[in-house]
Image (cartoon, helix red, strand yellow):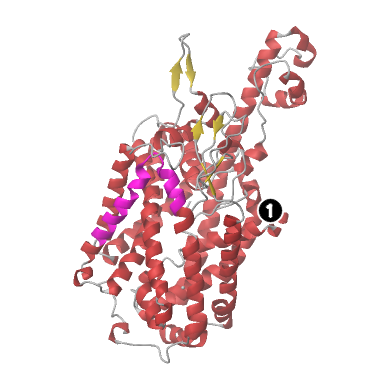
Amino acid sequence: MVFSNPSSVGAFLIPYLVMLFIEGIPVLYLELAIGQRMRLGCVGVWNQIHPLVGGLGLASAVTSFMIAIYYNAIIMWCFFYLFNSFQSPLPWSSCPTYTTDANETLVVPECDISGPTSYFWYRNALDISSGIDVSGGIKMKMLGCHTFAWIVIYLCICKGIKSSGKVVYVTATFPYVVLTIFFIRGITLEGSLDGLKHMFTPKMEQLLSVQCWLDAAAQIFFSFGLAFGGLIAFSSYNPMHNNVRKDTLLVGMTNWFTAIYACAVIFAVIGFKATVMYKHCLDHNIGVVADLCSNSDLLYTICKGYNSSTTITHQVFKTTFMEHIPMLQNLTSSQFRHCSLEDDLNKGVEGTGLAFIIFTQAINEFGPSAPFWSVVFFLMLLSLGLGSEFGTIEGVTTSLYDLEIFPWMKKKWLVSGILSLSCFSIGLLFVLGSGSYWVALFDTFAGSFPLILIALGECFAVGWVLGVNRFSEEIKYMIGSKPGIYWQWCWKFIAPAAILSLLMGTIVTKFSKPITYKAYNMETLRWHQPYWLVVPLDPARNAERGILALGQTMISISPTQACTWRAHASFAAFVMIQYGESTASSYWPRPNRLEPGARGCS
């Protein structure tokens, strides 16, 4: 799930459930039914309804193409972590060290503050540049993973639905097995119950926040994959009289259960991560206090015999020394850190930060078996990523088949090859040092507004151009009964209103302030934590899509503005831009290719 304010997770579940029934499931039913009845991809479907709405299909195909390009970057990163999992210890299990002129071996300060998993992600995996205008050169390790990812995708889609459909049997079920394993392990970790309590404790005042409702609507929208064209394409292969209403309810409720289940797994691990960071913060402060107490006789009344870090426990520090921190700070050049478990829980992490920082931290806790569980975890992410990529690409290829521009476009292996090669070539942007910025740019503008506009157009086309009465008759022809008044009102009034509200809210959210993105940089190595570790998350959406942990320093897109760094920041922050379809025809055309079985999988 995607939260603009992690402290409002409990309240988020309420609008999430509401938007599920007024936006998600009705539009899902619409797309599955229209594809099954028309036996066409998204381009053919909307042209059949009325030529004036035929552009919806092309819009879906182009948008899916753009999303397929950058979505593979996540698969590329998963392959990178998977390949690095075949070693013990794991490369993100500990911080690198360096030797000083005094022959002392010290931990790299940035890693000591941020943690080994964060350091590995930003330094080793991304090797990120300071901004989108600084390419940073091609990262050969990522180029290899990028190439391998597209080879795998092509081999899975080259035969069309026959090949990708069989692969989905694995990609759709394997994640549940791994989620269950991680849930069992997660709830045994220290602090997991704090995370679960945080998840299920609603702050009801958040229901008054427009952003909370926007996040819920966006999460439903992207988790179902509405308006991509893939749902219409896949449903066009169903038998004509398949019970599409039953499929819709099954998929909708399974999606809801999976979201809650995955959320519980995530917050169990976030609770553990927050506890680790909180204790690490306390240990730092205890070290400063112990140094003061061992070197100053003036503090005897405060220290009370506690003169080493081994005798000052966390409880002793909180009860004896916490209230004296302002005074003690004046007696040392070392800096005390602000430690709060609640703040660490509220910060959370999302998207790629969740997968590559939080969960890798949890994997480290599996001990000697950590490499095995790392392989299993990233295989699960790959199965999810590949499954989503197959559906996205299917929305493009089916549209190309239906267009029939050239005779050779009936050769599925050739169309798939050209499509994969095109996506691979454009995706070379993502193997640069600035690649993660490009992923964020694609995710923000290619995967948000177009999909919302297309879904709004789909509701208009069915609800007002074709008409819900005619559409209901066609559903009756397929399953034997007409949809009830709930479905008809949702298609004509409620869902369009919800999607329009989402569109307007998104526009206001994104364009009410100057468009900015956030960049990573390191200037000096002092004790200060990087801002992406300590500040609340900015608004974001997700899609499955997922997006990164995060910071405060802003770089304006305007060419007249330059990077502005806070004077007291020792590490500047890395943050990504917030991420992851007149009158109706007088009859419903029924040419031969619309007959049951005309478009099967054989």
What kind of secondary structure does the magenta stretch mostly adopt?
helix
Q: Is residue 528 magenta?
A: no
Q: Quadrant of the N terminus?
A: bottom right
| Observer-nearest of 66 and 379 | 66
Residue 38 x/y as whole percent: 37, 80
Choose between 219 and 194: the one closer to the eye.
219
Instruction: Answer left or right for 529 relative to 224.
Output: right
Name the residue carrying label 1. 202
User: What residue appears at the point 77 percent right and 26 percent down from the top-left corner?
Assistant: 323
Which span of residues is magenta-colored? 416-442
Image coordinates for residue 446, horizontal then vertical, percent:
44, 58
- Using the rendered image of the protein, determine whether residue 307 is visible from the camera's viewpoint: no
Q: Quadrant of residue 139?
A: top left
Choose top left, top right, bottom left or bottom right for residue 69: bottom left
Whether 424 is among the magenta residues is yes
- Locate residue 77 relative to residue 264 in the image: left or right: left
Residue 125 in view: yes
- Point out residue 168 in the picture as x, y percentages from the top left corner: 35, 60
Q: Which of 567 and 101 lies nearest the eye of the viewer?
A: 567
Residue at figure coordinates x 51%, y 31% from the top left: 115
Residue beneath the point at 49% across and 74% down = 457
Q: Residues within 10 Å of mark 1 (few under 14, many from 20)?
A: some
In the rendered image, which quarter contains the C terminus? bottom left
The secondary element bearing badge 1 is classed as loop
